[in-house]
Amino acid sequence: MPQLNQLALVAYSQFFWLLLVLGLIYFGIGKAMLPKIQSTVEARESRIAGDIAAADRARTEADATEEAYRAKMDESRGEAMKLAVKAKSEGALATEQRVAEADASIQAKAAEAEARIKASRTAAVGEIEALAAGFAKDIADKVAGLSVSEADAAKAVKAVMVDG
């Protein structure tokens, strides 16, 4: 059979072409494409590593900046508290001085008013004694028919006012 005689020639020919195509695929992919893919992957890995390192540096700087910010805020709060305490103490001192001045002014006005009241009282008592002495003299003259001097009437009124 002639078909079977050709089988060896056809098989060798197909085997040759199979090896040739597999060789081209091996050298085309393995030697030409694979190094490009591998260099791209390595470049990507190095870029990612660089980005991670930059992010770590940025995070470290941000932490340092935040720590400095917090320290500055704490310092500012302390300064504000000192100023507030100072302002409160100055305000209290100023208020205390104003109260002391007002108290002194009130005390002076009260002393002045007491002196005026005492003077008015003394004057009123003097007037009452003079009127009472006049009434006592008139009453003694009209009711008892006694003649009393104004000095004696004044002495009698003073004695009654001191006792009463």
Image: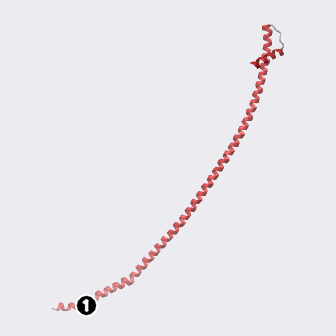
User: Position of 52 compared to 72: left or right?
Assistant: left
Q: Position of residue 56 (x, y in %)?
A: 50, 68
Q: Residue furthest front?
A: 163
- Between 18 and 112, the residue placed more toward the observer is 112
- Between 147 and 159, the residue placed more toward the observer is 159
Please name the residue shown 78% across and 23% down the image: 123
Quarter occupied by the N terminus: bottom left
Q: In the rendered view, would you say 125 is above or below 71?
A: above
Please name the residue shown 78% across and 11% down the image: 139
Q: Position of residue 121 (x, y in %)?
A: 76, 24
Specify the amino acid type for callout 1. Tyr
* Helix, strand or loop for disc 1: helix
Give the quarter of the image for residue 126.
Answer: top right
> Which of the colour schemes (rainbow, by chain, secondary structure, one colour) is used?
secondary structure
Q: In the rendered view, would you say 9 is above or below 135?
A: below
Please name the residue shown 58% across and 60% down the image: 71
Q: Position of residue 146 (x, y in %)?
A: 82, 8
Give the quarter of the image for residue 129.
Answer: top right
Q: In the rendered view, would you say 85 is above or below 27?
A: above
What residue would you read off at disc 1? 12
- Between 37 and 86, the residue placed more toward the observer is 86
Q: Position of residue 144 (x, y in %)?
A: 79, 8
Give the quarter of the image for residue 134.
Answer: top right
